[in-house]
Amino acid sequence: MRAVLDACVLYPTVMREMLFGAARAGLFQPIWSDRLLEEWALTGAKFGPEVEAQARGEIALAQAAFPTACQKTRPGIEDRLWLPDPNDLHVLALAVSSSADVIVTANAKDFPRHILAEEGLGRADPDALLQGFTEAQPEGMAEVGARVLATARRLSGEDWTMRALMRKARLTRTGKALERLET
């Protein structure tokens, strides 16, 4: 499955790391554009120059980990597309240009399913997608979750539980599924 990752699922660290872990496990092929990566960096900039610098470092690591993920949009394709928020047209144009199967976004209202279906695309909520991966590949996703949890504990100094960390990351169903695997 080829999936465009909207900027809103790239910036929150835990959500991004869960998605990247699933991609590393071969569950999907991530796709993004230079513009989506810049949106990720600019979101970090809202929290200060240090956070922006960290985001840019993470972007460099993501590009190295997934060297084929960054795709270009065919010229002129946005002109024939429509979305409720014109600022999101570049995401849809990227999905069409790169022959993606789905757009992974937490912004459902701006990506109506019927419009995406006209282009042969689906929309996936990151929590539902990761929950599905967890059910389909429990061992692999348990490893991904354990790595993300260990990193969160190490970086924050807090003794997170899987469920609490995933809930904070707006991945409540994924957290429940992963918690079931721990027992």
Image (cartoon, grey):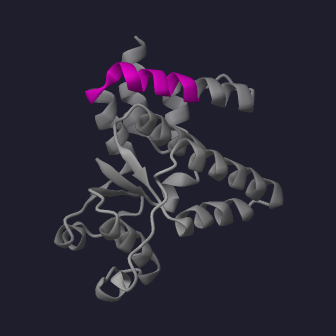
Answer with the quarter of the image where residue 50 lies: bottom right
Q: Quarter holding the C terminus?
A: top left
Q: Nearer the viewer, residue 59 or 174?
A: 59
**Residue 106: percent from the left, percent from the top?**
42, 57
Instruction: Please say whether residue 87 is visible from this viewpoint.
Output: yes
Task: Name the residue rendered at 52%, 45% in the picture.
Answer: 16
Direction from residue 119 to residue 131 in the image, left or right: right
Relative to 10, residue 121 above or below:
below
**Residue 14: percent from the left, percent from the top?**
56, 40
Task: Name the residue rendered at 35%, 27% in the picture.
Answer: 177
Tell whether position 143 is magenta: yes
> Start and end of the magenta stretch?
136-148
Q: Nearer the viewer, residue 94 or 153?
A: 94
Answer with the quarter of the image where residue 78 lies: bottom left
Relative to 50, residue 112 above or below:
below
**Residue 161: percent from the left, percent from the top?**
56, 23
